[in-house]
Amino acid sequence: MKVRKSNWFLLFGANFLGIFNDNFLKYLLIFVAVTWDLPSWLSQSQLIAAISGALVLPYLILSPLAGKITVKYHKQKVFSIMKLLEIPVLLLAVAGFWCQNIVLGLLAVLFMGILSCLYSPAKYSLIKDIGGEEQLSFGSGMIEAMAFAGILLGTVTASWVSDHYAFALMFPILILVGCLGYLAVRFLKVREATIDDSLNSTSNLIRFINDTHRIIKPYPLLHQAMIYYAIFWLLGGVLQMNLVLHCKTALQCSNTVTGIVTAMAAIGVISGCLAAGKVISKTNHLKIAAFGVSGIIVALLVVIFGHLSVISFAAAIFVIAFSGGFLQVPSLVLVQQNDLGRKIGDVMAYLNWLTFVYVLVGTVLFSIIAFLTNDNSIAIFIMLCVVAILTLGSILYNINRKRRYM
């Protein structure tokens, strides 16, 4: 299948720019809002949890609607409209910073989460429309790599801007990136599968979950792959929050150094996703995922017991993140390689919903453990290690079960 390289560039670029803005806004609010007049109960760890939760909540409620509009309408059009609507939301964020109002800031983050939720199934479904079955590994690896490139540059830029904070510096970054993201989607040229008006899709959450379970039931390992993908994001979400906490409380880092350490995680995932996309074959997805989780466990144990300096801690975080790419990409490929037609929209929406259920669980665990241990970041790393060990056990069980039925 001949693929227009400009389509890959525009899809990956739109994904990068959208995630850059999400993370730039998120971390700038985390770093800058602590200097505002906040309620006494809103500690730094609770502020991190509240802002992170505002991005997660829409996926828990609106994923069925996202799947429905992806099935019923052209995916590029859905993607384009949502990116256009991001621009007034970014203006709301700007107003929040101008007024130093945490409520406006949280509302802007929440609305960005809503729009990201509504276009996410369309965005991921376009991978197969652009590259076909034969380029799923490449497209999946690259779109995830670009996502973490967005996290990387968004986080580093936010940390630097917060240390040299000026409203005139923050404003053009948010708006310019938002406009470029819209233009990237607007100029995509994709031949999508024909819309089938006979397909039923629902925005009722309970019915959506039941219907999607019926869709995925005939496909071996599909649901397990979705769970592993969701666990990756649970691990990544908690790690991202805990890096800020650990760098501030245990290592006494500045915002800029904290951003650099967080950037090491993003660089690690980018490298891991690209490497995993190159080595995946049709038969070794689970083995690659097991390799990735094993690397996460080993590096977490080093962090927990190693009494690391800033540099060695950043190196360990890189290894954790690099290994995470070898869990993420094979899981996503296992989901997308099935012949689901336009129902892939519902399946990807369900994957988003499941992922952010896990992310919310991770956010709640982070908040509870931080509260009970007086913001002890090592206790949170221990929790991540336990989750990774349980995940490795599940993957090894599925590998052995697959061998028995071959």
Image (tube, grey):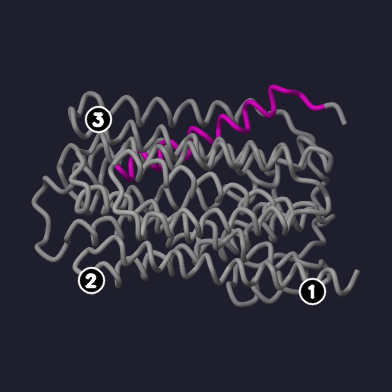
Per the image, the residue denoted by label 1 is 401
Task: Report which quarter residue 230 is drawn in.
Answer: bottom right
Number of labelled discs? 3
Q: What label does residue 373 carry, if any?
A: 2
Chain-order first, disc 3 or disc 1:
3
- Label 2 element class: loop
Give the Cα distance between marks 3 and 1: 51 Å
Q: Quadrant of the C terminus?
A: bottom right
Amino acid of disc 1? Arg
Asked if the residue under mark 1 is in contact with the one under mark 2, i.e. CB atoms within 8 Å, the reply is: no
Q: Quadrant of the N terminus?
A: top right
Chain-order first, disc 2 or disc 1:
2
Per the image, the residue denoted by label 3 is 161
> Quick one: label 3, few (<14), some, or many (20+) residues within 10 Å?
many
Amino acid of disc 2? Thr
Q: Which residues are magenta?
A: 3-27
Q: Is residue 204 above or below residue 19?
A: below
Residue at 58 percent of width and 49 percent of height: 120
Judged left or right of residue 149, residue 274 is right
